[in-house]
């Protein structure tokens, strides 16, 4: 299992960490943001397929910000997948 931390842009959480193992997401943690919403996202995505998660969450908007916590997570996962080809 590999651990990653990404810095965010344009959202309340300043960073998000997650682990990847065999293309599945684990241990997602948002550092800041709405605790209930970010905890729910993390619980819902535990063990989910990373590529499918990117497809579902990428482009999700929060109040006209042109991004969101979910979108930032998707962008971070996509960047990691691109670099590691996991």
Image (cartoon, rainbow, N blue to C red):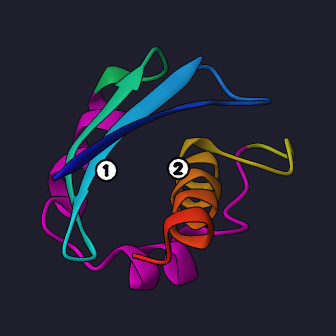
**Mark 2, mark 1: which one is toward the viewer?**
2
Any magenta on residue 51?
yes
Q: From what the image shows, is residue 57 above or below residue 77?
A: below
Does residue 12 sit above or below 16 in this rendering?
Answer: above
- The residue depicted at 54 percent of the width and 58 percent of the height is 80
In the drawing, does residue 9 fall left or right of residue 38? right
- Magenta run includes residue 41: yes
Q: Mark 2 falls on what kind of element?
A: helix
Q: Position of residue 55 (x, y in %)?
A: 55, 83
**Residue at the spot 13% in from the left edge and 67% down from the top edge:** 47
Q: Nearer the viewer, residue 1 or 51?
A: 1
The image quarter containing residue 10 is: top right
Q: Which residues are magenta?
A: 36-62
Residue at mark 1: 41
- Closer to the chain start, of discs 2 and 1, is 1
- How far across and how far down the image is residue 34, in percent? 43, 23
Q: Position of residue 8 (x, y in %)?
A: 67, 30
Whole-angstrom CA distance, mark 2 to mark 1, is 10 Å
Q: Residue at x 37, y 73 (%)?
A: 50
Q: Main secondary structure of the magenta part?
A: helix
Number of callouts: 2
Which residue position is annotated with label 2?
Answer: 73
Instruction: Give the image quarter of residue 7.
Output: top right
Q: Is residue 76 visible?
A: yes
Q: For numbered disc 1, what is the local secondary structure?
A: helix
The image quadrant that residue 9 belongs to is top right
Q: Is residue 16 left or right of residue 65?
A: left
- Vertical order, 75 against 34 (above or below): below
Report if residue 13 is visible in the image.
Answer: no
**Cβ atoms under marks 2 and 1 closer than 8 Å:** yes
């Amino acid at each position: 299992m590999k651990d990653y931390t990404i810095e965010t842009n344009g959202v309340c959480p300043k960073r998000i960490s997650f682990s990847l193992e065999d293309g599945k997401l684990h241990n997602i943690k948002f550092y800041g943001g709405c605790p209930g919403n970010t905890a729910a996202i993390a619980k819902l995505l535990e063990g989910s397929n990373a590529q499918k998660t990117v497809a579902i969450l990428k482009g999700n908007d929060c109040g006209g910000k042109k991004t969101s916590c979910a979108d930032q997570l998707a962008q971070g996962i996509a960047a990691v997948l691109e670099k590691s080809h996991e």
